[in-house]
Image (cartoon, rainbow, N blue to C red):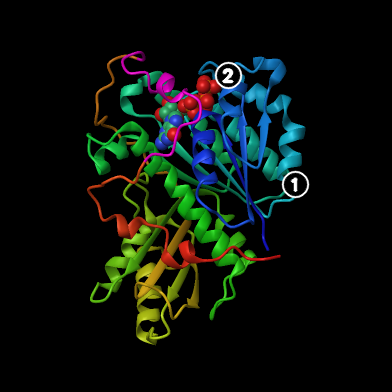
Amino acid sequence: MPKLTVLGVGGCGCNTINQLSHANLPPSVELVSVNTDAQAMAATSSHARIQIGPQTTRGLGAGAKPDVGCAAAIESAQELSQQMQHADIVFLTAGLGGGTGTGALPQVARLAQELSKPVIAVVTMPFSFEGQHRKANAETGLQALLESANAVIVLPNDKLAEVLGTKVTLLNAFKESNKILQDVLFGLATTISQAGLINIDLNDFISVISRQGRAAMGVSNLKADDDLVSAVKRAMQHPLLDNIQLNQAQAAIVSVVAKDTIELSQYNQIGATVHEQLPKDALVIIGLTINPDLESELEIMVIATGIGFAQPEIQDPIPAVNDNYINVHNFIKRPALHVPEPLQTKYDVDNLQIPTYLRQQKPPTH
Ligand SMILES: Nc1nc2c(ncn2[C@@H]2O[C@H](COP(=O)(O)OP(=O)(O)OP(=O)(O)O)[C@@H](O)[C@H]2O)c(=O)[nH]1
């Protein structure tokens, strides 16, 4: 079974790993926490831990300096490479804007690239109220990452307030943002290892995710009397993702799970809707798995890759006051972000949930 290795780098990356470790992911997914901050990392639950840059940072974090994060990754390059060498696909995740994630993530992606591993990175951009300095750090880190990772999925933290409402707690908002990676991992791990009626194998995945650039990902399901075209579009436009131009995507992988009553016309419609959103010459791979016990009519997962670099958004939804105005950084520095209760959201949570067939799937036996 293909092995997916996920490295969460820095405070945000380790929060995500911690959350994933409670998510009952398939055994083919390996979770690794990577941090300069020894104390914060010790509180993260994962399969493996790598404290990077023990000489450079003495276990005390990178102090919001990306140069320090970068030096730490270089110092620990051997350990990082060893951890990734048996992976079939490498996932990287971090919050950009601080020191460790911003500086180390592009280095880790480069190491994975040297090992010829396909790399998907999922990163957050800081809230506007965290200030210009963090924002500029994050933009620089993102550019460096786009050069070394293949597919980069960007989640601007400002979208959390926009989509979830300003009353959502910070912990719940983070949980929702970290859940996107969880959905991707469930989708990928299960789809590649599952024999479908129309099969998607690891090589199909690699040919799609190897396209350099930004990426989009989403899942949705179709209930009785629902509109199929809207369900496909929902899977292609996750509300927490950065505004990206799907009409520039070079490739997409679409995994459809359906009851045995799926009609040929529905299958065609899914393909046609995905093609309509992408350039004419985009590579689209569609897999189909039949599951007679599915709760909904259909479940759709889409990953679109190779998207050109979108222009950064010009206006700040929340004006930055100064770098110390609200220090989210210190807030989230608390060890072991606990996993909060399910939250109420303004959008239709069902359409963003992990597909039922993935949730209900029993871990494969080796
Ligand atoms: N969505 C989300 N964003 C987070 C989370 N934790 C931190 N962030 C964001 O990520 C940015 C970077 O914070 P950290 O990950 O703590 O920083 P770091 O990479 O460890 O860097 P140093 O602490 O300077 O070594 C913050 O400015 C926040 O915008 C989280 O759990 N979820």
Quadrant of the image occupied by residue 274 = bottom left
**The CB of the residue at mark 2 lies under 8 Å from ligand 1:** yes
Residue drawn at (56%, 56%), measured in percent from left and top?
A: 209
Identified by mark 1, the residue type is Gln
Where is residue 300 shown, x and y percent of the image? 41, 67
Where is residue 102 shown, x and y percent of the image? 53, 28
Identified by mark 2, the residue type is Gly
Q: Is residue 343 above or below residue 132?
A: below
Magenta stretch holds residue 258: no
**How far apart, in angstroms, are the residues tagged by discs 1 and 2?**
26 Å
Q: Secondary structure at mark 1?
A: loop
Residue 37 visible to an observer of this rendering: no
Residue 56 left/right relative to 323: right
Residue drawn at (32%, 63%), measured in percent from left and top?
A: 233
Q: Secondary structure at mark 2?
A: loop
Quadrant of the image occupied by residue 78 = top right
Q: Which residue is mark 1?
A: 85
Q: Nearer the viewer, mark 1 or mark 2?
A: 2
Q: Which residue is mark 2?
A: 61
Residue 269 left/right relative to 80: left
Magenta stretch holds residue 325: yes
* Dot placed on the residue nearer the N-terminal end, 1 or 2: 2
Q: Which residues are magenta?
A: 323-340
Question: On the rendered image, what quadrant is the C terminus found in?
Answer: bottom right
